[in-house]
Image (cartoon, rainbow, N blue to C red):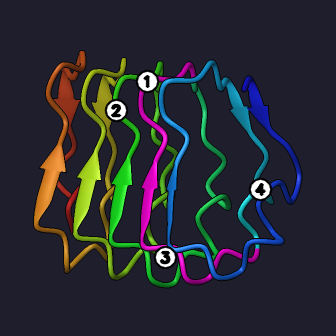
C-alpha cells in the first residue's frame, strides 16, 4: 500500500481498530477516514509519511491511541491533534521532527503517554502543550 485514497475507509463506520503499519504509505487523503467515528486505535507506524493534513483526524471522536512512529514526518501542522480530545496515547517516535510548535498538543487533556524519542527536535516552543 502506497496511498490511502479519498474515502478509502468510509464504508467501515463501525471500525474501532485499524493497523496499516509496515507498508509503503506516503500519502493519506484528508477524507480517507471521514466516517470512522468509532475508531479507537489507529496504527500507521513504519511507513513513509512526510506530511499529514490537519483535517485527517476530524472524524475521530473516540480515538484513544494513535501511532505515527517510524515515518518521515518533519512538521506537525498546528491543530493536527486538536479534535482528538479523548486521545490517551500518541506515538511520534523516530520521525524527522525538528520543531514542536505552540499549540501542537492543545486540547489533549486526556493524554497519558507521548512518544517523541528518536526525532531531531531542536526546539519545543513554550506553549506547545497549552
Task: Say which quadrant the N terminus sits in.
Answer: top right
* Number of numbered markers: 4
Name the residue that disc number 2 marks: 69
Q: Which residue is mark 4?
A: 32
Tell which circle, 2 or 4, labels the residue nearer the N-terminal end: 4
Q: Are marks 1 and 2 in contact (CB under 8 Å)?
A: yes
Mark 1 residue element:
loop
Residue tagged by mark 3?
Answer: 83
Q: Which mark is residue 46?
A: 1
Could you say which is closer to the camera, residue 2 or residue 125? 2
Q: Nearer the viewer, mark 3 or mark 1?
A: 1
Q: Which residues are magenta?
A: 35-48
Q: Nearer the viewer, mark 4 or mark 3?
A: 4
| Mark positioned earlier in the residue sequence (1 or 2) | 1
Q: How far apart are labels 4 and 1 at the CA level?
A: 19 Å
Q: Residue at x 46, y 56 (%)?
A: 42
The mark that comes first in sequence, 4 or 3, is 4
Left or right, residue 74 beside residue 58:
left
Residue at x 49% of width, y 40% of height: 44
Amino acid at each position: 500500500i502506497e496511498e490511502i485514497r479519498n474515502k478509502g475507509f468510509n464504508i467501515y463506520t463501525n471500525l474501532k481498530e485499524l493497523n496499516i503499519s509496515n507498508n509503503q504509505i506516503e500519502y493519506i487523503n484528508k477524507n480517507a477516514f471521514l466516517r470512522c467515528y468509532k475508531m479507537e486505535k489507529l496504527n500507521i507506524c513504519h511507513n513513509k509519511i512526510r506530511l499529514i493534513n490537519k483535517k485527517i483526524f476530524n472524524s475521530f471522536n473516540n480515538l484513544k491511541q494513535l501511532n505515527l512512529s517510524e515515518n518521515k514526518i518533519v512538521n506537525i501542522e498546528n491543530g493536527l491533534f486538536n479534535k482528538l480530545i479523548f486521545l490517551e496515547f500518541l506515538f511520534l517516535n523516530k520521525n524527522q521532527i525538528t520543531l514542536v510548535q505552540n499549540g501542537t498538543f492543545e486540547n489533549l487533556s486526556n493524554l497519558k503517554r507521548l512518544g517523541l524519542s528518536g526525532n531531531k527536535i531542536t526546539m519545543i516552543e513554550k506553549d506547545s502543550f497549552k
